[in-house]
Image (spheres, coloured by chain):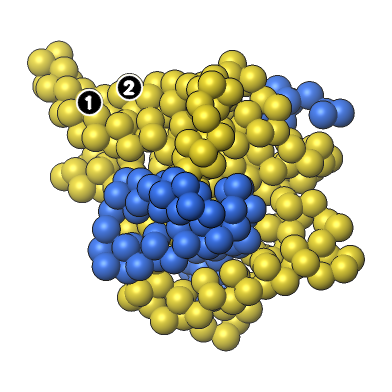
Chain colours: A yellow, B blue
Amino acid sequence: MKTEKNRRSAFLRGMRDGLPIGLGYLAVSFSLGIAARNIGMTAVQGFIMSWFGVASAGEYAAMTVIGAAAPYIEMVLVSLIANARYLLMSFALSQRLDPKLSVLHRLLIGYAVTDELFGIAIAQPKPLDPVYSYGSYAVAIPMWAIGTALGVIAGNVLPLSVVSALSVALFGMFIAVIIPPAKQDKVVLLFVALSFAFSFAASRLPLVSTLSDSARVIILTLVLSAAAAVFFPVRPDDMEEADI
Amino acid sequence: MRHNVYIYILIMFAVIYAIRVLPLTLVRKQIKNRFLRSFLYYVPYITLAVMTFPAIVEVTQSPIAGAAALVVGIVLAWCGAGLFPVALSCCATVFILELFL
């Protein structure tokens, strides 16, 4: 049985490791807040969205749906696609938990499986102490939500040049996520290049360009990912490395 | 906006939470199907790439500044820079270039 003291120390370790992540979140979610402001969302809506979403690409994709006033079903599809990588991470994380860990703990750990928080959880000795994750969540999630709200508010106050500059932070983060695997895996590199090309073409071509942004993202992702999976299936032993 | 923002957020949350929690609670084994595994492996990179371009050149005041930020971000990430430095460098690139453009 774990003592009260052990739990507290695991929580504090989680908070310590969550702090640098939270600081990065503050900056990136600020950019997310600017995007939220651009589609007319309020600071409160931005805060709630980030508090419950805890997902950069997922929330940004959701904003393209809200901005386009697209049907609710599009929100379901876009959210499935934009957050599909969390499915992989949760699979990987499920192998790290004590098989006897209660469902309640599993429900709580699942709340904030993000690239970064998943990253530090995986670096912990197996089985993962859920209290460690709660410590990291307790620091990182509020900073993510506050940053978003600040982005909405300050986006109205800051000069246009600063808003313009900050609005690319989110894309900078996306680039930082896709380039390292593209460097290691030439197929990923090829498909990143193809994604850029097709996405650009789809935004310009007649007919296709009349689709909403979110519909374009769904269609292109499904088609290109299916093509990649058919022509370049991943060997199971590669996956173990790639998942994590 | 015709639709209710809070309903959109609720749907988003329900989907994201289900994605995160279902593998942790229900599935204790790895996915076996090769196509599905490969598909899930490629989806995150492709969807992020599709969302990044051309959007990055459309959010800035000058498209050239956005394009430059994209190039700077790719080069720095290629050289091993982390998430935060890459994001900040993209912002700095846009800020500096838009002073002149």
The answer to which of A49 and A124 lies nearer the viewer is A49
In which chain is the residue bearing label 2? A
| Residue at numbered disc 1 | A15
Please state, as top left, top right, bottom left or bottom right, where the N terminus of chain B lies in the image.
Answer: top right
Indicate which disc residue A181 carries: none
In which chain is the residue bearing label 1? A
Image spot of residue A18 (x, y percent): 26, 32
Image spot of residue B17 (x, y percent): 55, 36
Q: Residue furthest front?
A: B100
Image quarter for residue A105? top left
The answer to which of A101 and A151 lies nearer the viewer is A151
Image spot of residue B76 (x, y percent): 32, 63
Image spot of residue B98 (x, y percent): 50, 49
Q: Residue sitting at 30 percent across and 32 percent down?
A: A23
State whether residue A116 is above or below residue A81. above
State whether residue A175 is above or below residue B96. below
State whether residue A201 is above or below residue A214. below
Residue type beneath disc 2: Ala
Residue type beneath disc 1: Met
For the residues labelled 1 and 2, say whether their Cβ atoms are less than 8 Å apart: yes
Q: Residue furthest bottom?
A: A231
CA gap, disc 1 and disc 2:
7 Å
Q: How would you rate the neighbour count of disc 1 (Cα within 10 Å): few for under 14, some for 14-19, many for 20 or more? A: many
Residue B97 seen in this snapshot: yes
Total numbered labels placed on residues in the image: 2
Q: Residue sitting at 64 percent across and 20 percent down?
A: A42
Mark 1 or mark 2: name the one nearer the start of the chain.
Answer: 1
Query: Is label 2 in a helix, a strand or a loop?
Result: helix
Q: Residue sitting at 73 percent across and 36 percent down?
A: A66
| Residue at numbered disc 2 | A138
